[in-house]
Amino acid sequence: MIDVRSDTVTRPNEKMRAAIASADVGDDVYGDDPTVNALQEFAAELLGHEACLFMPTGTQSNLVALLTHCQRGDEYIVGADAHTYKYEGGGAAALGGIQPQPVPFGVDGGIDLNEVAAVLKEDDVHFARSRLLCLENSQHGRVQSLDSMRAARAFTQEHGLKLHLDGARMGNAAVRLGVSLKAVAQCFDSVSLCLSKGLGAPVGSLLLGDRVFIKEALRWRKVAGGGMRQVGLLAAAGQIALTDGLDRLQEDHDNATFLAERLAGIDGVTVREGWTQTNMVWLDFDQDCGAALTLRARESGVRLSAYGRVCRLVTHCDVNRDDLERVAAVIREFFEQ
Ligand SMILES: *Cc1c(COP(=O)(O)O)cnc(C)c1O
């Protein structure tokens, strides 16, 4: 099976499996796991933040960031199509009493700071307290510029807000921008980063911020059920993902461009122009045929997820150009039959 549903489907490579097998471990709830501690210190240095926490998932990283920045009755401002708002089960509201204030994403997947200014609330008993702005980079595979992130930083400082990055795929964003992870991360008070997507680890995410923030986040991670024990087994794979994974992402981006080119000119299919910036290709169909395509592709050995008139294809370390030729051929055959 060729799987282009997501970059989360990758299997750990031999080097990761060997590192898992030989990892030195301890009880991380006691702070005793040397492999976790080493990863956290390495990542803090790499991203230029004071401290770091290894987390089970990106969803929990974002949730813990929200719980740490915001109190009950506070609000965070977030893109209306953002993962933190739309795809995390309403966790901040359900578990933290934190009110989301969505604002529309622009056509490039960025947030217009004028839109944010327009929804900011005054200090008045009628209103929730505006506390935090959340950005996402990459957003549906599209990358926000360093300038736009720096502008958000200046804006939040001016308005007394904190700034969080849902950087599940910030490695892809940094590679596309040709800058370091640190250059991106330093625009933010806190950053979450997934090890389990394009970087190739089986499990894991990182949350970074200053020492005071991470101390409080450690408490919320425990409350959220994310205090894990001999988790150096996973951190060992995460370390390799962070050390080796970043340099490989350009290949995924090149492969996505290759796939987009192969899909050009099929009747009934539009490749979203300008969206193939990292490891994703987005398609729009003239007809509501997503379910039928998903089924047909599966019968032909390709796993993809198309819904209604939309399809997102994602490249990663377990698909090569031959696989992508096959994906393109299966989609073409479906529409040309
Ligand atoms: C995948 C993803 C997350 C959540 O990560 P999980 O590890 O799947 O919980 C958060 N934000 C974005 C933008 C993502 O793509």
Image (cartoon, rainbow, N blue to C red):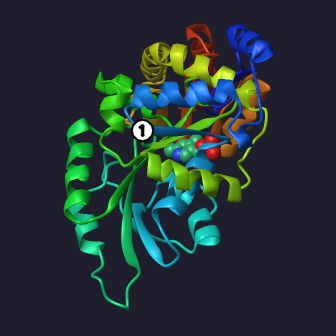
Q: Is mark 1 within 8 Å of ligand 1?
A: no
Quick check: 67 above or below 215? Answer: below
Question: Measuring 37% from the left and 32% from the top, which residue is drawn there?
Answer: 48
Depth check: give the residue in front, 112 or 1: 112
Instruction: Judge by depth and name the residue closer to the eye, 305 or 100.
Output: 100
Crowding at mark 1 (Cα within 10 Å: few <14, some 14-19, many 20+): some
Give the labeled residue for mark 1.
50
Taking the image as shown, residue 15 lies to the left or right of residue 154, namely right
**Quarter of the figure with residue 257:** top left
Q: Position of residue 167 (x, y in %)?
A: 46, 40
Which of the 4 image quarters holds residue 201?
top right
Query: Which amino acid is tagged 1?
Result: Glu
Is residue 4 found left or right of 174 in the rendered image?
right
* Residue 134 to residue 236: above or below: below
In the drawing, does residue 90 fall left or right of residue 11?
A: left
Residue 267 makes an appearance in the image:
no
Q: Residue furthest bottom?
A: 126
At 29% from the left and 42% from the top, the residue drawn is 187
Residue at x 30% of width, y 78% of height:
121
| The quarter of the picture showing ligand 1 | top right
Callout 1 secondary element? loop
Between 26 and 251, the residue placed more toward the observer is 26
Does the rendering let one see residue 248?
yes
Q: State the image coordinates of residue 278 (x, y, percent, origin top left).
A: 42, 27
What percent of the width, then of the height, locates residue 99?
49, 73
Please tell me which residue is depicted at 51% across the width and 28% down the height of the picture.
41
Q: Which quarter shows the N terminus?
A: top right
Question: Is 284 located above or below residue 118 in the figure?
Answer: above
Image coords of residue 331 (percent x, y): 60, 27
Q: Please identify the quarter of the rendering in which residue 173 is found.
A: top left
Image quadrant holding the C terminus, namely top right
